[in-house]
Each structure stands twice: as C-alpha cells, then as structure tokens.
Amino acid sequence: MKKTKTHALFAIANLVRKELFSGWGAMALFLAAMLLTVGAPFLVASKEDPTLIPSTRTQVACFFAWAITIFWANLRLASIGSEQRLRNLSLFWRCMGVSDFSRYLATLAPFFSVSLACNTLAGAAYFWSYLSGQQPAMVLLAAALQFAALATTVQLGLYFITLGLSAVITGPSAFFLAMCLGLYGIYGAGIVALLGGGTSNPIGGFLWAVSPQLSLGDQTTRLVFNWGSLPAQDFFAILAYCALWTAGAFLLGLGLFKEGRLSASA
Amino acid sequence: MDCPVIESVFSVGYTGKKVATTENSIPLKAGEISILVGNNGAGKTTFLKTVCGSLPPIVGVAPTGQKVYLPEELGFPPLLTSHEILSNLFVSASLVIEAAILFGIPSNTPYQNLSKGNKQKLRVLIAEQFATLTRASILCLDEPLSGLDTLARQLLVDVWNQKRHLPSVFSNPHRIVSMHTGEAPTNVQTIVVDGGKIRRLPPISNCDTWMAFASEHGIKLSASK
C-alpha cells in the first residue's frame, strides 16, 4: 500500500513537472530567462567604467532569478493548481487514498526545484563576477549561499499561498493575490509603515510588525554592492524569520487547499 | 478475501441534504460489474463518490479498502501527448503504452487534440492500470463508455469479461441501450438509484432500453429530486 502511495506521489510530481515545461511558450520563456541569468551579465559594457562590471552583472543575474521565481513560476503554479481542480485530477488522487498534504507537497516539488536552481545560478553569477576582486572566495561563496537560502525560503512561502489560493479561486485571481502579497512584503511594508507615521508611531509600528518582511529574504543589494556575507548570527535570525513566514504560509495554503478539495467534491 | 458490501442502511448526499438511501445491502463481488442506472439528478454520481470516499455518507459507513474512481470528466495537461501522460504516470509504462496502442489511442497527439472517444479510452486505461497497481478493492467508473464508438465499447467489454478481478461499479445511466445483449459484460448486477432509493436488481438481461427496463421494474421516469 505504501509503495503504491509513493508511486502516486511520483506520478503527481512528474505530471506537474512535465506540464510546467510543456508548450513552446512556457519553455522558451523559461530558457530565455535562464540564459539571461547566466549570459546577460557578461554582455554588459566593459569599456565605460570597468569597476561597475561585477555589480551590473550581479544585478542582472539577481533580477532574472527573481523574475523567473516570482512571476513565471507563480503564474504557472496558479494555472496548474486551478486546472488540477477543474480537471477533476484532485478528486481522482483523493479517491486513490493520496492525502491532501502529500498531494500539496508533490505538486510544489517541481517549483521548489526551479526556485532553488534559479537562486543558486544567480549566486554563482555573483561569485564568478567578483572572484578576481578583493573579497576572499569563501566570503563570496558564503554570501552567494546566503542569498540562495533566504530567497528560496521566502519564495517557497509564496508558492504555498499561490497553490492554496488556486484550489479555491481561479488561476489569474490566485496569481494576482499572491503577487500583491509578495510585492507588499518585499516593497510595500516599509512604505505603509512610513504612511502610518514611521515605526516609532504606534500605528506605523503596528503595521510594520504585522506585515510580512519579505524584503529580508532579498539580499540582492548586499550582492550587488559586494558587502560580503552576513554575520552568522544575523543570517540565522533572518533565516528563522523567513522560515517562520514560510511555515505560516504553508499552513494557510494547506488549509485553502483542503477547503478547495471539499468544495470540488461537492 | 471478503467482498466489499454496501450496507443496508447507507445514505448518500451532501451536508444536510440526503439524496438517496439503500433499501437492501449490496455486495460488490470480485469479478462482478455493478451497473448503476437512474434518471438525471437521481444521485448516481453522488453514490459513486460516496462509495469511493470522496464524500462522507450521511448514514452508514462506506466500504473500506483501496478504491479507484474515474470521474466523468477527468482531464490531463492539454499539451502532453498520451505517451507522455502514461510514461509520467507509471514507472513501468511499457505495457500500458502497448495497451494504449492496441486501443487505437494516437501516441504522439497532444491530449487536447485527441477525439472525445480517445480521451475516454485513455482515461479508462489509466483507471484500470491504477486499479491493478494498487490492488484496489473497488473500481468505480463514471460513464466509462461515454463517447466510445461501437468497436471500442465492445473491445473494453471483452477486456472486462476476460480480465475482471475486482468488483467494479459503472455509472451508465442514460444509455442502457449501449449495454444490450451482445455488448454487455457477462457478470453484471444492476443498482437502480431512483426516487431517493438505491436498489439492487437482477441483470439488465433482455431490456434494450432504459424505458423498457424501468417499465419492467416499476421505476418512475420522473425527476427524482
């Protein structure tokens, strides 16, 4: 019995992975972005001001990594998630005894791989760009790994929410809501806190405290300006915060995912 | 192994709304096909979903064990070919791919471009394969012959007659005519869902149409909801 459940989980993950990259449009977009992540940094002008080359390369790599993982992957996830419900695939797996929890994780597995691959590539682009500079290789490596770990953790949380939403509402709506939350967490929280009178003001402070601080997971600036790796204590504190956000997103997404299954079976 | 039994007190429906209740217990024997018949909206799909565990019964307990349920409109990623779908679903896909070729399902045509009949053949094949792999105790197929041409129907029925090893419940409500003598599986029991009741009846035998069958067994041909 356990073997057949494992087989079913592999089948779900395989089918999602295959669908993720199916069609020329989806595949071409992904390949173009991947190539740009690795290749575009080496196309920047090198005669104007050579000191800017590593930072420009790093910025381009990080930009494309975030673009793929946040926009492309979330859009595909919202679409695949809602299609699974509309195609009765959720009902099919459920009746086979595959739990919602397992199906939730199996559906997300290919997206987690994409996120990890893109962030690692961006980290590698940073590493190679600055390798001949002042910083020791180990510091560059640590900074690159920290970037990949934090970005992947934050993005995984967003994927959980997107998949949960796509089980109860349409794909475009799920994508839009998850994007609003993601962009608010990365850029909006600070602005809203300022509008509330700054973090020293009770209202501004409250808004700041309850907002997801996803900008902590985006270490692009640190890489672009080559500030080196975060001190271990700071890194683990930020990682713990990001992991907490991802755990909360996981529970919220799973709750929505189960709710979607119930409404689909009715 | 004991055969699964649907209890004599077994009600199906949605929260707060009972749709149908059994009049007698219904054993689902290995090798036997149970054909579910009834009017539109009588509760056939609700009954199938409840037996397979997708919906909780209002009263009673659903049969236990591994089940495979094929919903009427199960879909797959539109851009994947039938070959890609099968090879991603099954670790050892060579036999099932051969079966797909035998059934005349085009290997390299994207799912969205398959005809209605070929999509249905692929779905039935996948459900059958999962039932075999998981050693399911019950296989439920909602309208398995829908969209199939005569040849494909006969081919599937022949396969069911030869290789049936587990109890199966088929919803085939609107087209008993497609299951008449010469095309029907040999080992069949009929379950009628009508007027809020679920009854076990003898095989369809010589009745060519739902009208004739309903008339013979005193089933009302009116909306049952």
Image (cartoon, rainbow, N blue to C red):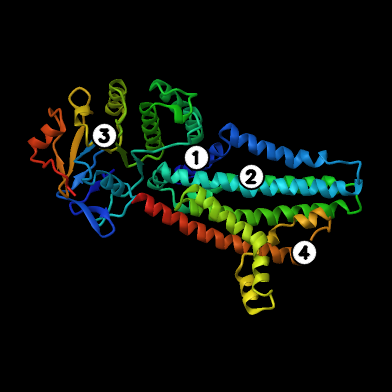
Query: Which residue is pictured at 69% across the width and 78% down the height?
Result: A200
A207 lies left or right of B179: right
Q: Foreground mark, 2 or 4?
A: 2
The alpha-carbon separation of the residues under discs 1 and 4 comes to: 40 Å
Residue marked by disc 4: A232
Residue topped by disc 2: A114
Sequence-wise first label, 1 or 2: 1
Q: Are marks 2 and 3 on the same chain?
A: no
Is there CB contact under 8 Å for labels 1 and 2? no
- Is residue A1 visible from the viewing direction of this image? no
x, y percentage for residue B27?
21, 44
Disc 1 target residue: A11
Q: Chain of mark 2?
A: A
Q: Is residue B171 visible?
A: yes
Q: CB under 8 Å between callouts 1 and 3? A: no
Residue type of the residue flagged with mark 1: Ala
Q: CA distance from mark 2 to mark 4?
A: 26 Å
C-beta proximity under 8 Å, tags 3 and 4: no
* Comes first in the chain, label 2 or label 4: 2
Q: Amino acid at mark 4?
A: Ala
Between the residue at mark 1 and the residue at mark 3, the CA separation in whole angstroms equals 28 Å
Mark 1 or 3, which is nearer the eye?
1
Q: Position of residue A72 (x, y in %)?
A: 61, 44
Quadrant location, the N terminus of chain A: top left
**Which is more foreground, mark 1 or mark 2?**
2
Determine if marks 2 and 4 fall on one subunit.
yes
* Residue for badge 3: B31
Q: Residues within 10 Å of mark 4 (few under 14, many from 20)?
A: few
